[in-house]
């Protein structure tokens, strides 16, 4: 590798380097301790320096120096890991540089020319691969070490590297941490002790920052049940963020395709960079905090002061600019933030140069003044340019929709089928003349909010402050609930930028029949059945349209239980289109991965909830050490936002807090509920008693301020005399939750989500593995531990095909919703690699036609993919099967495959096959399942006969199996003897069947048979893949002259050869095979 010319003093390196070649201008050196004569104390010291110090010249075992003539100055210009590599560089210098140097007169000109040439070579090499790195030169050096030490496939992309200490037991090892797209790697070499660690991101169970008495700050990694600690990091937070992003990226790409498809910025694993991951992390945090659409990316951040009119002072904070939004968040504890959509900006006034201020004018005759902005002129120009983009016909259309929809009629783009009024206004219109205490209090709440709007603004550009949260906690007026939900969730922005989208979805989805629509129809009348709105066709039809439209929009989620309950409540207070966009905000932003087949998001938040219980309720933890009970009880709390356990008039107050504070509000309320029932829960004797206590508590929760009439209010599920002895007001419960647990920060919750997501997904994967092993163990003779290792190898091989491409057939077919056995499958290429590592006799090379025949044989449903059960059953026969079963397996390999060419085309073009497959035929699956149950045991008499060419290939396969065995010659002679015996038997049988045959014909046949015997007795060197492939294709053309054998004949003949029987009955060291495959699997992928 060419290096940026760096001046060194050769006299300081005499003890570390040995000169191999030299001339007038260049010196090729080898590092002591490497190559010939290496080792000893010098080698140990040099190796230690190579690991600890950050310099390629101190790491690479070979280097080339340029010597300035008539001077003691030397310049390092190249280095190499191997002698072949450095010799190539040396030869290039001799051929392209040496002749040119003789024309220069001064030594300075020579050195300048050499330096310029080398820099030109480096620049040419770095045009593609290193252009995105901050320091290409240092990164080149790190990449050299990474490739040298870990020998990963060349496609593996190094992202970044750090110097750190790795704690192996109680001893720290100083070395280098390398973070690549698919692996976490560490290398250390201290005084002869080499430590090398390679962990793939998809194997990590926990990743967290920790501290203890010995390690003040470190990063903890849990993988394969082993704990790994990395400390002494100069930039620990930066390192942790990159590791967190890479682990999350791997989880989404390999386990959770639904989430990964929402990340187009990280679609190519070969283009991941440190800068890109950092930008992605910041954009993710930015979107989460301001509730922005997932298409938004953080482009610029500026520190500034914002003039707050209601407080009459400037608050310090940061301006965050994305493609379509200008946001500000304070940093002085005032909890103030504001979101300004670019479509709302009407002007940006000329900046004030004296105070470096700019004023942004928005609709509604409001203006926001930002001061002390360092790069105020550029920011003003950026806002103007983006406002110009947003002031397009689309922008005009969105504003038109807003104006028209305010008329409480059908919007301009809506069809008459879509309702534009909230169901609560239809089924419970407010009586203006009603002056009962509850209505008076409701009017007072409305007045408080109107005052708040006058001070802080109303609509998308409203200031969010601590006072806003206080009003939320006290309760939102019925009339304002839908508007505020839209505002706090960010759904108002989605709806404004997608005019007519919902109506179009409704028209497209009406009349469609899918599994999701069937489930929706089944659950429609289970959604708030006590409420009058859902006892009529108006409410049911609106609920059907919203759920069906969302299932059409997001088929990956489709419809999941609990979505109907949530959508019902949204429809009560929001218009139909608004309810749709609120559902989008909840499912895709606020509760990510909740409503999918594995409800991963809900499980993650339950794990976060358990952590908070341990931290905030230690008394409860002491009494109930197993907190899994709370996970099972609280699942409905998270999935339905307490709507399923609280009366509707109380649950809507919880939803108010959720839309403002996100999942943090649900976690706080959950802690408050457990805290309120602490004494009763501690005195419980079993889980059933605890469930009863919580149910009674929820039945007792009321909303004393609710203006809803009794016909609308939901009766408690366990309403009885005992439950009515006490009651808890929902406003008091929420206020207590904020007072006691309001210090929980949203940022901490998000970090805990990321930390627990790894553990939750790995737990689900482990459950899948246990289920698969339980099923497969009933059909094979492998031990549970061997099956566990074999499953890990099989799954790893699946992932190896996915590490460096997004178009892997195995990845495209991976679906977590499938049955356990079908979740991980191997295509032919992946299968052939793994099978060649595990097969007991090394007869099946990676790319041989025989490997394809094995794949075809065990692929029972002929879908071009092999699952774990099929794979392990085949290995079980070869490892532990009887002599008869092993021979039958080899015999079946050589049976005619039907149309081999079409089968190869089928498995090598899975994408074409995937497009041909339409809707899943459930009847076909049931029929296949029935056939599997009724399938009888195959006997040796059921096997067809093999013809001449197939028998010849069968003999060649036996030669391949025996090759390299200590008794190879005896085995070869035994096969030749069996072949000759079978041919003679066939000849005798033919003569008995044809007594009137002419005498010349048998002679001819005998000659043919002798030639066939000679061909069948060839050595393995003659059995290449092309001949074996042609042997099966050529069979039908020789039908007039060829003979055939049954399996019974072959078996009987081979049983007479003890050396062959003992070879096949020889036990296989399964553990050694699995251990070898585990080590060689990654290296084999490089081939």
Image (cartoon, rainbow, N blue to C red):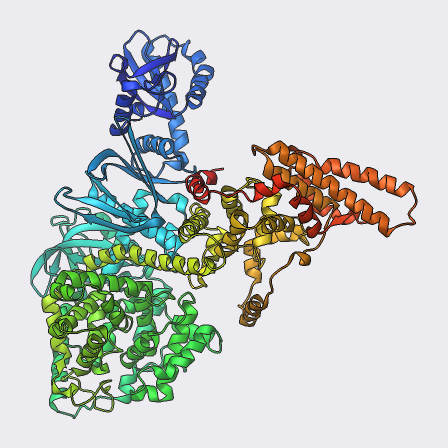
The percent position of residue 336, horizontal first and vertical second, equals 14, 61
**Residue at the location (29% across, 87% down)?**
531
Quarter where residue 119 is shown: top left
Residue at coordinates 45% horizontally, 12% vertically from top-left? Answer: 99
Q: Is residue 171 visible?
A: yes
Compared with residue 839, is residue 361 higher up or lower down, i.e. above or below? below
Total tally of numbered discs in the picture: 0
Residue 825 as seen in the image, left or right of residue 459: right
- Residue under the point 23% across and 87% down: 715
* Residue 901 image position (x, y, % from top left): 66, 50
User: Residue 338's image quarter?
Assistant: bottom left
Quarter holding the N terminus?
Answer: top left
Q: Nearer the viewer, residue 1016 or 143?
A: 1016
- Is residue 298 rendered to the left or right of residue 200? left
**Horizontal and vertical percent for residue 602?**
29, 66
Report whether 868 appears left or right of 378: right
Image height of 756 relative to 846, above or below: below
Residue 405 in the image: state x and y as whole percent. Answer: 31, 77
- Residue 751 falls in image quadrant: bottom left
């Amino acid at each position: 590798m060419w290096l940026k010319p760096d001046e060194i003093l050769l006299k300081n390196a005499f003890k570390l380097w040995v000169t191999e070649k030299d001339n007038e201008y260049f010196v090729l050196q080898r590092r002591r301790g490497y190559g010939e004569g290496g080792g000893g104390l010098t080698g140990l010291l040099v190796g230690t320096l190579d690991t600890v110090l950050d310099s390629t010249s101190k790491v690479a075992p070979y280097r080339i120096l340029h010597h300035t003539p008539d001077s003691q100055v030397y310049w390092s210009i190249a280095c190499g890991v191997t002698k072949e590599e450095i010799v190539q560089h040396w030869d290039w210098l001799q051929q392209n540089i040496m002749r040119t140097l003789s024309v220069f007169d001064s030594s300075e000109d020579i050195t300048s020319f050499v330096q310029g040439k080398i820099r030109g070579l480096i620049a040419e090499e770095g045009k593609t691969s290193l252009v995105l790195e901050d320091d290409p030169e240092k990164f080149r050096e790190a990449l050299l070490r990474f490739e040298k030490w870990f020998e990963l496939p060349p496609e593996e992309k190094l992202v970044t590297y750090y110097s750190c200490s790795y704690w192996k037991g109680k001893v720290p090892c100083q070395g280098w941490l390398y973070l690549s797209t698919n692996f976490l790697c560490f290398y250390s070499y201290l005084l002869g002790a080499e430590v090398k660690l390679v962990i793939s991101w998809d194997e990590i169970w926990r990743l967290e920052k920790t501290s203890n008495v010995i390690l003040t700050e470190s990063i903890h990694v849990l993988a394969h049940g082993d704990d790994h600690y990395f400390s002494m990091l100069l930039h620990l937070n930066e390192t942790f963020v990159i590791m967190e992003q890479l682990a999350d990226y791997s989880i989404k790409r390999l386990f959770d395709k639904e989430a990964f498809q929402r990340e187009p910025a990280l679609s190519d694993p070969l283009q991941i960079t440190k800068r890109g991951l950092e930008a992605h992390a910041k954009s993710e945090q930015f979107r989460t905090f301001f509730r922005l659409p997932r298409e938004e990316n953080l482009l610029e951040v500026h520190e500034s002061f914002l003039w707050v009119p209601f407080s009459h002072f400037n608050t310090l904070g940061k301006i965050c600019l994305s493609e379509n939004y200008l946001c500000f968040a304070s940093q002085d504890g005032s909890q103030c933030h504001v979101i300004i959509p670019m479509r709302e900006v009407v002007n940006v006034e000329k900046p004030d140069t004296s105070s470096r201020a700019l004023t942004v004018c928005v609709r509604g005759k409001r203006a926001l003044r930002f001061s002390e902005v360092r790069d105020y002129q550029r920011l003003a120009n950026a806002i103007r340019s983006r406002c110009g983009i947003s002031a397009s016909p689309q922008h005009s259309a969105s504003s038109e929709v807003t104006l028209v929809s305010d008329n409480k009629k059908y919007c301009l783009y809506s069809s008459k089928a879509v309702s534009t009024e909230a169901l609560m206004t239809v089924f419970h219109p407010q009586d203006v003349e009603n002056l009962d205490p509850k209505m008076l209090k409701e009017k007072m709440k409305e007045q408080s909010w109107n005052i708040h709007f006058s001070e802080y603004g109303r609509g998308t550009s409203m200031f969010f402050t601590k006072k806003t949260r206080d009003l939320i906690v006290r309760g939102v007026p019925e009339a304002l609930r839908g508007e505020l939900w839209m505002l706090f969730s960010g759904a108002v922005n989605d709806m404004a930028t997608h005019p007519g989208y919902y109506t179009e979805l409704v028209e497209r989805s009406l009349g469609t029949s899918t599994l999701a629509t069937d489930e929706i129809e089944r659950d429609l009348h289970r959604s708030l059945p006590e409420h009058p709105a859902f006892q009529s066709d108006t409410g049911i039809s609106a609920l059907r349209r919203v759920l069906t439209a969302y299932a059409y929009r997001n088929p990956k989620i489709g419809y999941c239980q609990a979505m109907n309950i949530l959508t019902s409540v949204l429809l009560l207070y929001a218009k139909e289109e608004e309810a749709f966009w609120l559902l989008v905000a909840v499912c895709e932003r606020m509760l990510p991965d909740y409503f999918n087949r594995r409800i991963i998001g809900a499980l993650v938040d339950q794990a976060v909830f358990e952590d908070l219980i341990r931290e905030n309720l230690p008394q409860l933890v002491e009494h109930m050490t197993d907190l899994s009970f709370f996970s099972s009880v609280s699942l409905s709390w998270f999935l339905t936002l307490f709507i399923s356990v609280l009366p509707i008039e109380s649950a809507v107050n919880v939803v108010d807090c959720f839309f403002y504070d996100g999942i943090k509000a649900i976690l706080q309320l959950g802690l408050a509920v457990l805290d309120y029932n602490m004494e009763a829960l501690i005195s419980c004797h079993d889980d059933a008693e605890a469930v009863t206590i919580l149910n009674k508590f929820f039945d007792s929760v009321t909303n004393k301020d609710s203006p809803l009439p009794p016909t609308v209010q939901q009766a408690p599920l366990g309403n009885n005399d005992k439950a009515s002895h006490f009651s808890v007001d929902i406003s008091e419960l929420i206020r207590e939750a904020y007072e006691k647990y309001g210090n929980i920060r949203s940022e901490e919750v998000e970090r805990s989500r990321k930390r627990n997501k790894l553990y939750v997904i790995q737990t689900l994967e482990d459950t899948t593995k246990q289920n698969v092993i339980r099923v497969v163990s009933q059909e094979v003779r492998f031990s549970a531990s061997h099956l566990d290792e074999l499953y890990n190898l099989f799954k790893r091989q699946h992932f190896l095909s996915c590490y460096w491409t997004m178009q892997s057939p195995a990845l495209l077919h991976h679906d977590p919703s499938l049955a356990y056995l079908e979740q991980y499958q191997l295509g032919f290429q992946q299968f052939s690699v793994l099978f060649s590592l595990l097969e007991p006799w090394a007869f099946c090379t990676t790319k041989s036609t025989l490997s394809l025949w094995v794949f075809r044989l065990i692929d029972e449903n002929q879908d071009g993919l092999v699952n774990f059960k099929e794979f392990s059953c085949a290995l079980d026969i070869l490892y532990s099967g009887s002599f008869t079963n092993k021979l039958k397996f080899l015999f079946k390999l050589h049976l005619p495959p039907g149309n081999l060419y079409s089968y190869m085309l089928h498995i090598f073009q899975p994408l074409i096959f995937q497009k041909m497959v339409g809707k899943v035929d459930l009847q076909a699956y049931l029929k296949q399942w029935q056939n599997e149950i009724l399938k009888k045991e195959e006997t040796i008499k059921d096997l067809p006969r093999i013809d001449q060419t197939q028998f010849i290939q069968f003999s060649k396969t036996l030669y391949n199996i025996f090759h390299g065995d200590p008794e190879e010659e005896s085995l070869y002679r035994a096969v030749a003897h069996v072949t000759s015996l079978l041919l003679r038997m066939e000849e005798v049988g033919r003569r008995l069947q044809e007594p009137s045959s002419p005498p010349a014909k048998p002679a001819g046949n005998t000659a043919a048979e002798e030639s066939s015997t000679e061909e069948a007795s060839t050595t393995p060197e003659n059995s290449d893949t092309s001949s074996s492939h042609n042997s099966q294709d050529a069979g039908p053309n020789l039908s007039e002259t060829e003979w055939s054998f049954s399996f019974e004949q072959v078996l009987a003949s081979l049983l007479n050869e003890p050396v062959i029987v003992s070879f096949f009955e020889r036990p296989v060291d399964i553990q050694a095979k699995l251990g070898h495959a585990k080590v060689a699997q990654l290296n084999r992928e490089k081939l």
